[in-house]
Amino acid sequence: MDPMFSPALHRQRHEFVIDFVRSYKPKKVVDLGCSECSLLKQLKFHLEIELLAGVDIDGAILKKKMCGLAPLSTDYLQPRNDQLRIDLYQGSVTQKDARLIGFDLVTSIELIEHLTLADVKLFSEVVFGYMTPVAVIVSTPNADFNPLFRRMSGFRHSDHKFEWSRAEFKSWALKVCLDYGYEVEFSGVGQAPPGYQENVGFCSQIGVFHRLGVSEVCNTLCSTDAEDVSSYTLLYSKIFPSLRDNNILRRVLASEVLYWAEKLGRRWVEEKTGVKDDADTPDQAGGDGEERHRAPENPLQLEEKQTAACGAAMKSLVEHQEVGKLDRELFWTDGGGQQESRKLGRCVSVPLFVLWGCCPKICTLSGSLSNLRQLLMDNAKVKLTQDGSALLLNLDEQDEEDHDFEDSGYADAMRCPHSVEPEEDWDANV
Ligand code: SAM
């Protein structure tokens, strides 16, 4: 019986790249022959990547699949700290384009076997000699493995121009290293059945190249060749929301501040009145409020820590209030006539320094108390006291959640289905 792979071989190849990305944390990654963008779709979740590009000669497939790269609603709800731009180009890897110079990682997964040998030579020149990335991952079928596919005749795919044995791949890779100043390690994915591995190797063979003497290679090759060559067509370019964008930073900070102010305000009212607030407060609900404030890493611990900090701050504040030291300076409710008090009884004023002390995320986002004040000013959703030292909050109004995300990309993300289309059958069995 022909070997079957689990997980599927194409997934194992992508997982190999992702493991590399996890270890080396490249900031700029380009996938050559990206086809349906499935590797790019996984790489965009790696927060250290700031520029992600894909190149394929087949513009139709890129156009069909590119909407799957758009930011998701979660990218708007929890913007990244650093920017991510995704660019997709239609073009041939046999041609130079200056926009692809200087990447940290170039991947070429099951691409070279679709090129003629003359084009493989051009590919080597373009990738190793012109783009001069720090690392390159090249995968290609291993012809030594093919006899294990008993029902297969010829190549694994009708578009393959060749399939190299391990010795042929090694010989090409070593020549590339010699010509362009790289070193290579050989590896692969798709284990042979027990007892065969030694003789046939992996089903997909992989070379991982690292540039030697970074500055020499870059200096000689970047400066001579880099002039304004742009032979590729940019089909898609999207900048993901990030906290580097001041408008987004203000929005996220305001939402964080309102969340904690509401939380503190409600507790304070409870303490003062002895009446339990059964409103759907963010810490009680499992809905949007809580979702929105979960950090991607270790959310439960973070939430617990913040709630504990909030509790401690409340305790100390209430104690202060009881001894009458800080009274209205810290929290304030309207104490007017009967009617008014019913209407305004759940208005509180929460000092910014209290919020600062309660929520580490507010500290991180704003940097300083005066920045916090500055960033909250002119925000229509945030009402500050006249001297700007505290936030005024009407708890009765606060229950309405704000889902108004201004960037039209949000709507794009909602429009584009991400998983409905079947994948192209590049390697039905391998
Ligand atoms: N890398 C993809 C993956 O891992 O899912 C699969 C690649 S698919 C087997 C080969 C891709 O190479 C096709 O999308 C094809 O259009 C592209 N291709 C072929 N010749 C090319 C060239 N000269 N320049 C760029 N892309 C090319």
Image (cartoon, rainbow, N blue to C red):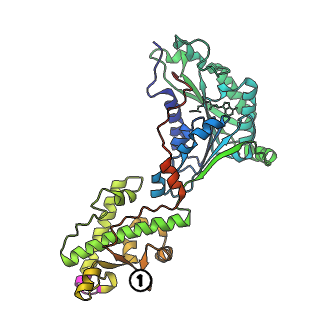
The quadrant holding residue 88 is: top right
**Residue shown at the point (28%, 87%) measured from the top left:** 325
Horizontal and vertical percent position of residue 66:
58, 42
Secondary structure state at the residue bearing disc 1: loop
The quadrant holding residue 82 is: bottom right
Horizontal and vertical percent position of residue 149:
52, 14
Nearest the viewer among 282 and 142 is 282
**Residue shown at the point (55%, 66%) measured from the top left:** 246
**Start and end of the magenta stretch?**
320-327
Is 189 drawn above or below residue 148 in the view shown? below
Q: Does the image show residue 195?
A: yes
As for residue 280 lying within the magenta part, the answer is: no
- Please give left or right for residue 375 compared with residue 233 in the image: left
Q: Badge 1 is on which residue?
A: 385
**Residue shown at the point (58%, 16%) measured from the top left:** 144
- Please give left or right for residue 275 compared with residue 368 in the image: left
Nearest the viewer among 184 and 135 is 135
Q: What amino acid is found at the position of numbered circle 1 in the picture?
A: Thr
Q: Spot the residue most to the left.
A: 274
